[in-house]
Each structure stands twice: as C-alpha cells, then as structure tokens.
Amino acid sequence: QVQLVESGGGLVQPGGSLRLSCAASGIIFSVNAMGWYRQAPGKQRELVALITSGSNTNYADSVKGRFTISRDNAKNTVYLQMNSLKPEDTAVYYCYATIVNHSGTRGYWGQGTQVTVSS
C-alpha cells in the first residue's frame, strides 16, 4: 500500500503565504514525477505545478512567479511554497505522485488539503 499524506493548508489573507507538504509512504522502489493539482468549487481539477525526478519543473501560467515546487527525494516528499496568494487560489489542493513498486508503475493521489484565501 502507498499513501500520500498532505499537510499545510489553511486560511490566509490575500498577499499571504502558505507551504504545502506531501509525503509518500509504503512500499516504494522509486518516485518519478510529483505534483500538485487543485480543484475549486464548480471547476475541473487543474495542474498547478509538476516536478520530475530530475527536478525539472512546470507551472500553470496562473501561478508562475508566485509558487515554487520542490522535492526531497530522500524523504519522498514534495513541497509547494505559495506566495502572494490571491482569492482565486482558493481550492482543494491535491498531491500526485507516480510511484514504482512491486505492483508496477502507477499514479497515486493524496486526500486533498483546503486552501482558502480571504480577508
């Protein structure tokens, strides 16, 4: 069994910052790409940021220059530093990871963490 456990969500004022963390645990041989998605009420889930095993990154245009994704391979953990937050960043944020283990290679999702940007 593989689990992705997220932390760090909450309520923040516009212009503020939050840092999300997501740790993968269980039977893991290696972790390929890791990323963050978000889903706002009434909208489809969208990619926020992605980081490969070689630390190449990709960001949604809406968060470029404000969010930074990083990872700690020794801890199988991915982070999302979110600065200059806007009300439109309000959503449930989901961690995603492509994991290799004895069952093969497949994607896993975290349970989601709520981020609310409001004054």
Image (spheres, helix red, strand yellow):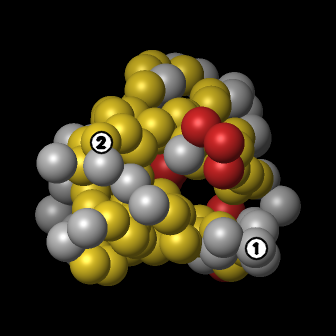
Q: Indicate the position of residue 106 as horizontal and vertical percent values.
A: 27, 76
Residue located at (27% from left, 57% from top)? 109
Residue located at (59% from left, 37% from top)? 75
**Relative to 1, does residue 47 appear above or below in the rendering?**
below
* Contact check, label 2 and label 1, Cβ < 8 Å: no
Q: Foreground: 97 or 118?
A: 97
Q: Which mark is residue 16?
A: none
CA–CA distance between discs 2 and 1?
Answer: 22 Å
Q: Is residue 79 visible?
A: no
Q: Is residue 30 visible?
A: yes
Name the residue carrying label 2.
26
Q: Indicate the position of residue 62 as horizontal and vertical percent values.
A: 63, 70
Q: Which mark is residue 54?
A: 1
Label whose residue precedes the other's in the sequence (2 or 1) = 2
Task: Name the kind of residue labelled 1 in the image.
Answer: Gly
Task: Name the kind of residue labelled 2 in the image.
Answer: Gly
The local crowd at label 2, few if under 14, some if 14 to 19, many if 20 or more residues have their Cα within 10 Å, is few
Q: Residue furthest right?
A: 65
Residue located at (16% from left, 48% from top)? 1
- Secondary structure under tag 2 reads strand
Q: Indicate the position of residue 34 as horizontal and vertical percent values.
A: 52, 64
- Secondary structure under tag 1 reads loop
Residue located at (46% from left, 38% from top)? 23
Q: Foreground: 115 or 31?
A: 31
The local crowd at label 1, few if under 14, some if 14 to 19, many if 20 or more residues have their Cα within 10 Å, is few
**Image depth: mark 2 or mark 1 in front:** 2
